[in-house]
Image (cartoon, rainbow, N blue to C red):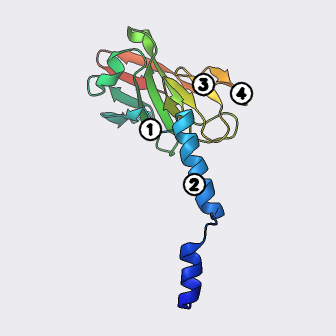
């Protein structure tokens, strides 16, 4: 490339399509709350021989209060979350984090799950709060015994 060509690129006031899309994405992320992600990675996750998962509730202090959520990956790579929806043993829920509309991974924002692809909105327990999704997130059975929650 000649020096004249470099000068043209340096002084150009045109915006590249890539730059424009990145800028729009950043503004949308800040405006609609796609960043930062609130749910944290779970600690003390054990896959049991029967295929179920066990979460150490003590190691995940965020689950001590309503609205707390931790995420983990199932052995098949599917993202899932354990959430505190109410106090007591029955207040622990587990859901798949795969949007039922188009299969994208949902993220937690302000105690709700939102799909960054199309904006489907779900309650922490997986219920649909906003379209285009019409089916709730897949729920997994949960059993709580002492300081352990077994999912599956």
Q: Is residue 60 left or right of residue 91?
A: left
User: Could you tell me how far apart the alpha carbons at marks 2 and 4 are, in whole angstroms?
Assistant: 25 Å
Q: Could you tell me which quadrant the N terminus lies in?
A: bottom right
User: Could you tell me how far apart the alpha carbons at marks 1 and 2 are, in whole angstroms?
Assistant: 17 Å
User: Could you tell me how far apart the alpha carbons at marks 1 and 4 are, in whole angstroms?
Assistant: 22 Å
Which SS class for mark 3? strand
Asked if marks 1 and 4 touch (Cβ < 8 Å), the reply is no
User: Could you tell me how far apart the alpha carbons at marks 2 and 3 are, in whole angstroms?
Assistant: 26 Å
The percent position of residue 146, horizontal first and vertical second, equals 29, 15
Q: Earlier in the sequence, mark 1 or mark 2?
A: 2
Which SS class for mark 4? loop
User: Closer to us: mark 3 or mark 1?
Assistant: 1
User: For the residue carrying disc 1, how many other residues have a C-alpha within 10 Å: few (<14), some (14-19), or many (20+)?
Assistant: few
Specify whether residue 75 is in view: yes
Name the residue located 44 percent from the left edge and 31 percent from the top edge.
52
Residue at the bottom extreme, as displayed: 2
Q: Is residue 44 left or right of residue 34?
A: left
The percent position of residue 118, horizontal first and vertical second, equals 68, 38
Q: Which mark is residue 131?
A: 4
Name the residue located 65 percent from the left edge and 34 percent from the top edge.
119
Residue 106: name its quadrant.
top right
User: Closer to us: mark 1 or mark 4?
Assistant: 1
Which residue is disc 1 drawn over? 36
Q: Nearer the viewer, residue 69 or 95?
A: 69
Which residue is disc 3 drawn over? 122
User: Closer to us: mark 1 or mark 2?
Assistant: 2
Q: Earlier in the sequence, mark 2 or mark 3?
A: 2
Which SS class for mark 2? helix
Asked if marks 1 and 2 touch (Cβ < 8 Å), the reply is no
User: For the residue carrying disc 4, how many other residues have a C-alpha within 10 Å: few (<14), some (14-19), or many (20+)?
Assistant: few
């Amino acid at each position: 490339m000649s020096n004249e060509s470099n000068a043209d690129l340096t002084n150009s006031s045109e915006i590249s399509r890539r730059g424009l899309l990145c800028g729009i994405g950043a503004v949308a992320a800040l405006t609609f709350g796609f960043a930062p992600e609130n749910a944290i990675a779970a600690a003390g996750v054990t896959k049991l021989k029967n295929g179920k998962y066990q979460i150490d509730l003590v190691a995940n202090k965020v689950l001590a209060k309503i609205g707390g959520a931790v995420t983990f990956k199932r052995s098949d790579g599917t993202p899932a979350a354990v959430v505190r929806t109410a106090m007591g043993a029955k207040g622990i829920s587990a859901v798949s984090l795969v949007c039922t509309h188009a299969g994208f991974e949902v993220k937690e924002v302000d105690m709700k799950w939102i799909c960054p692809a199309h904006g489907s909105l779900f309650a922490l327990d997986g219920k649909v709060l906003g379209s285009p999704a019409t089916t709730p997130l897949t729920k997994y059975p949960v059993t709580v015994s002492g300081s352990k929650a077994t999912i599956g």
